[in-house]
Structures are given as C-alpha cells and as structure tokens.
Image (cartoon, coloured by chain):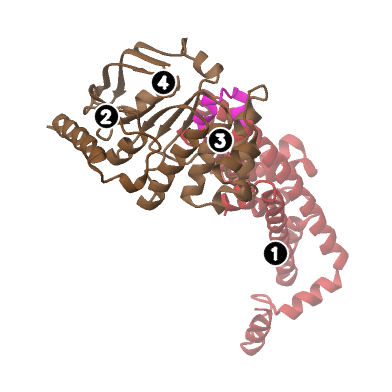
Chain colours: A red, B brown
Amino acid sequence: MICLWEGVTRVFQVPEYIFPRFSALILEFCKFPMFFLEGFLKTSLESCAGLLLGALSAYLLAVIFSFSRVLKDLFYQWFVALKTVPIIAISPMIVLWVGSGMASKVLMASIITFFPILVNTLQGFYNITENQLNLFKSLNATFWQIFLRLRMPMSLGYFFTGLKIASPLSAIGAIVAEFSGSTEGLGYIVLKASWESNTRALMVAVILASGMGITLYKIIEFSEYAVGKFFPQVNNQSL
Amino acid sequence: MIEIQDVSYSYSTKEGTLKVLDHISLSIAAGELVSFIGPSGCGKTTLLHLIGALQDLQTGSISINGSRGHTIIERNLYSIIFQEITLLDWLTVKKNIELPVRLNPRLKYIEAQEIMDNVGLRKYQNLYPRQLSGGMKTRVSIARSLMANTPILLMDECFASLDEVTREQMNLFLLEILGKIRRTLVFITHSIAEAVFISDRVIIFSQKPARIIGDVSIAIPRPRKLAGIENPEYTGYRKVIRELLNKSSI
C-alpha cells in the first residue's frame, strides 16, 4: 500500500498540498518527532481514559436496566437521543462545563463510546432463553445466582463486541474534544495544520490517530482472547 | 408420588383467552415411568411446568410427596430436562453436571465422577458443550439431572432433535440408567413407539384444551430390548394409542 501511495503520487506528480507523498510524511514527522509523539500520547491517554469511563458506566447502566424494565423503558430513549446529537455540537458545551483540560476530552470520549457498549451489553443480559432461566429456577437459584452465573457470563461476548465497536470511536471523541480549546493532542495538531494549510502535518496526525484506533482495537481483541480462555463462549458470541 | 387434581390452565393472547388444559386429574406413583403423548401444542409442556412449579397454578392442585407450589423446588423434588439443550457454554461437561451442587452446596448429591462413569462421560469431562454431539449433550443434561439426586425426573421431548438411531440408543441408555438409579419419570414425547418402549404407563392427551383421553398401562416385562420392538406386544399397544390419538383429532 505504501509503495503504491509513493508510486502513484510520484508518477502522477500529485501536488503536495492535495495529497503528499508518504516519504514527505516521514520527513515531516522527523522534523518535529516530539511534537507529534507528545500529541499522540496525550490523545491516547484521553481515549483510553474515556473508553474506560464509557465502558464502566455503560456496563453499570446495563446491569441496572437488566434488573428493571421500568427504568429501562423510562431512560433508554434519552441515551438514544444523546447518541443522535452531533458530537461536534456538544463539544464546546462540555468544554464550557468542565473546562478545557483533560476532563473534557475524557468526557467526550466516554460519551461517544457509551452507547454501543450499553446496547450490546444489555442485549447480552437479555439473551438468555426461557429454558435456561427455567433451569436455574428449577434448581432454586436465587436472583443473584441467576445474575452472576447466567446473565453475566452470557453478556461477556456482547460486552466485548461493544468494546470493539467503541474503541476506535474513543479516539474520535478525544480528537473532536481537542478541537474546542486545546493546545496539545492530535486534534490540536489537525486544527493547527489546517490553519497553516500544512497537509503533511495534517496527514501525519490522521495516520497517528488511525494507528491509535487500531492499537486500541487490538488491545481489546487480545483482552477478549485472554478472557475467552476462561469463558469460551466469548469468542463464539462476539464479532 | 405426584398428585394432579382438577388442573386447568389458560393463556391470555391478543385474540383472547386460550385454554390449554381442561380439568386434568392424574396420579403417578413413586418409581413409575410415565409418558405424556398428544398433539403438538396441546398443553403437555405447560402441565410439566406446572408440576415443576415453574408456572403458577390457576385452578386445581398439584402436589409432589405432599409438597405444593414453590416448596416443590425448595425441597429439590425434581430435575427437569428441556427439549432445547440447556448446557452452559462456558462450563466444561463436569462443571455443567455439577451445576445443581454449585447453586445449592447443601444438596445431597451423587458424586459427579460416579455419575459420569454411569453415563459414560468421564473421558469427556473437560470438554465444552460446543465440542459435543447432540446425543452427548443430551447425556450431559441427563447426568446433571441425576446428580441432583431428586426423586423425580421431568423430561420434555429431550430426544426429539436426535436422529432415529441415536434416539433409540438414548432410549436404551435412559432405561439402563433408570434401572440403576431408580426415579419417577414423567416423559413427554411425540413418538408412540418411544412412549411404549420406555413407559409403565402412557397418558394420552386430546387436542387443546387438553383432556386425558387415555391411560394405557404397558405390561411388557423389563428389561426391554430394541430387538423386540416390532413384536405384537409392542405393536398392540402402539395401535391402541394411535387409535386414541386419531379419535381425538377428529
């Protein structure tokens, strides 16, 4: 792919401001390596923290909704509504509420990751058959035994599916939050490069962001594999 | 001993009330092997669930050894095996069999190793359900129900999804196990041949709302062999049951 990129841009003499050569991106990175790396690390930290917060809160809420259909019917639609609001529209409001520090980026990343994890995990909690439930009832299982020994293991594969969908989204959330009042991070680099019409720096930031998303996804995939050693259904259930 | 007195049951549907059981009364003695047979959807599974207190009675009464309602479950009086295999995918064969004890550590149970030896599962004990055939999964379900050491076994068309040869093997296997570990059996089946082969009695139900239209005692001596399944003694009972079922469908 890289060779094709380099070859096509050289052969067709594509202007740098439209689509730089890959070698030009390497040079740009090497000119300011610490600038790009610090931005990458900052955004990575925000993404990971946001994903963790989003995952924990989504899982907790899925547990609560699995206990009470009434609560689920009352509040679920609000989370659907939150999901449909354009994230770039609420980003300035979040910066206004919690400041332009790391908190706003983590919060944005968690908001964007929350919904897919909630939906999938809740589906996992519900995805037990009537006969499985009857089996546990016939064995005089308590409410908590049914939850801990049936619903929770059943939901694991779905939880990991939600995590895999959400992990690249956490990067998007952090970067979009950095558009609103940040002086570091990949989002800031993208904005700065746009103002300066520096396509090379812009593309370096985009590639680093993609790399971050892929890395997060692979970490989740590996975690899923590890958990699958103890809960084999995880690998069968998830994407 | 299972006592069913004047049990009726209806479901609420969009079209109105659907009555599935109509004044069912029945006694099953300790150690009897009884089959329920009838048209699809006539209410046999509902009756099984009512016996197991998995659904609440609407009218009538059901008692097992004098216990009623949720006490039947609390006193661990039965084990149930469903048509759909209900093994837990994240547990090995051994842990699936041990599930009753994991949920109720104070249960008086038969050791898992002994059960696995009896049902021929010892060498599969560390496998997961996805690694087993349909017949093996059914054996694991039976082993789990035996481990709980309950006096009654309720089986809801457990062999329905198996091919004919495997099904016959499972019938023999069930009789062999029940010969060693005596239980009261209530067995739902659509197969007349299976009902006659396994049972001491076959209860025949009509179309819904189900009524008992026949109670045929099967006086064929045990042990029963598959080789004799086409003998007149078997075919005679099958003919009687078929005629009763045909009459009910008119």
Q: Does the magenta stretch include residue B47?
A: no
Q: Is residue B114 left or right of residue B227?
A: right
Task: Say which mark, if any, is on residue A206.
Answer: 1
Other-residue count near label 4 (Cα within 10 Å), few / some / many at <14 / 14–19 / ≥20: many
Give the amino acid type for the residue marked by disc 3 in the picture.
Answer: Arg
Question: Could you tell me how far apart the alpha carbons at marks 2 and 4 are, in whole angstroms?
Answer: 16 Å
Q: What stretch is highlighted in magenta?
A: A133-147
- Disc assigned to residue B42: 2
Question: Looking at the image, do the residues carrying marks 2 and 4 touch, with CB atoms under 8 Å apart?
Answer: no
Q: Is the magenta stretch mostly helix, strand or loop?
A: helix
The residue where tag 4 is placed is B51
Give the chain letter at badge 1.
A
Q: Earlier in the sequence, mark 2 or mark 4?
A: 2
Vertical arrangement, residue A206 with respect to residue A57, above or below? below
Measure how far apart labels 3 and 1 are at the Cα level.
56 Å
**Amino acid type at image mark 1:** Val
* For the residues bearing labels 2 and 3, Cβ distance under 8 angstroms: no
* Of B118 and B44, the residue lying toward us: B118
Q: Name the residue under label 3.
A: B144
Q: Quadrant of residue A202?
A: bottom right
Q: Local crowd at mark 2 within 10 Å, few (<14), some, or many (≥20)?
A: many
Residue at disc 4, secondary structure? helix
Q: Which of A26 and B184 is in front in this view?
A: B184
